[in-house]
Image (cartoon, rainbow, N blue to C red):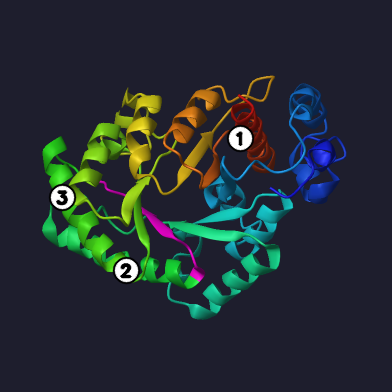
Amino acid sequence: MNFKRRNFIKKSGYAIAGGAFGGAFMTACSTKTLPTMAEKVAPVMAAIPDGPLPDSMFKISLAQWSYHKAIFAKEFTSLEFAEKTRALDIDGIEYVNQFFKDKAEDTNYLNQLNQRAADNGVTQILIMVDGEGGLGSLKEKDRTEAVEKHYKWVNAAKYLGCHSIRVNAFGVGTREEVGAAAVDGLGRLSEYAAKENINVIVENHGGWSSDGLWLSGVMAKIGMDNCGTLPDFGNFCVERENGQPWGSPCVTEYDRYKGVDELMPYAKAVSAKANDFDANGNDTGTDYMKMIEIVKNHNYDGFIGIEYEGQTLGETEGIIATRDLLLKTGWALHQK
């Protein structure tokens, strides 16, 4: 982070003036909401020391999914994502492939992404890949097709200077069946990615992948340096009513703290999921102090990516609230 803490409230989206984000942001968020949030959070944030977090802590990035409503509404595109991220004083970006699905092999487009990132001084970290098939599919033909569909995203990640692609290990079957299939699918993709010096990382993203013990066991069986995990603070629903990994109420949820602890030995990125916040700026669903302590106990000092999915705050305001919470937590742990 490259801004001074004493100027924080003036620059933050919580500030009543909201000048740093322009008229569009102020139109999206009511003037009634912003002062109330500012009054609640400003005293908490004022206690944060000046300057960036120490290098021994972690860096902060922004997952593009945090802006999925705005992007789906065509308010801006992936080409503007780096600028949006820098405007929030965030140093890294995590792309989502579905926002430029047909551009994986378009070097002109990828060159533009590289230039925008360089112009705004942000690091391109990874591409979250969805919609290319389940790498844990029990059908070998489907699994092979999924592996091969990911090749172009490995190549795109290398072109952009990312270190990883995030993939899904989804499959329908027993714990043992999907585990064996995922070892094969992820292993084969990781062999291809290793040639390009790219990591293949799996998020707890529904189904068996949201069982920390299952996913860490898959990683142990693969045993490749470039195959790892992306622990997400919130995606620990193992079973939903419709039998799919997304889209309906959760029936069985894995303990998120236990899950993150089990996945951290293989982590090459971390996702800070956030939804709603209390009057002190804390997430109401996850104890960030407890969670970040788990992350730091594994000596992780890489990027932690903001992934705001709440409904109460607008996307920009929710991203800022998550950023502030990470800063507050990081400094509190550093000062222990």
Q: Where in the figure is residue 47, as x and y percent of width and height?
A: 76, 26
**Looking at this rendering, what residue extends furthest in the right direction?**
17
Sequence-earlier tag: 1 or 3: 3
Tag 2–tag 3 contact (CB < 8 Å): no
Sequence-earlier tag: 2 or 1: 2
Label 1 SS: helix
Sequence-earlier tag: 2 or 3: 2
Question: Front-most of 186 and 24?
Answer: 186
In the rendered image, which residue does mark 3 sit on? 181
Above or below, 202 against 207 in this view is below
The magenta stretch spans residue 162: yes
Residue pictured at 81% horizontal, 43% vertical: 11
Cα distance in 3D space between marks 1 and 3: 36 Å
Q: In the rendered structure, which amino acid carries the disc numbered 2?
A: Tyr
207 with respect to 124 (left or right)? left
262 with respect to 104 (left or right)? left
Cα distance in 3D space between marks 2 and 1: 34 Å
In the rendered image, which residue does mark 1 sit on? 326
Q: Nearer the viewer, mark 1 or mark 3?
A: 1
Which quadrant is home to the C terminus?
Answer: top right
- In the drawing, what numbered circle is on residue 151? 2
243 with respect to 266 (left or right)? left
Q: What stretch is highlighted in magenta?
A: 160-170
Q: In the rendered structure, which amino acid carries the disc numbered 3?
A: Ala
100 with respect to 143 (left or right)? right
Q: In which quarter of the image is residue 31?
A: top right
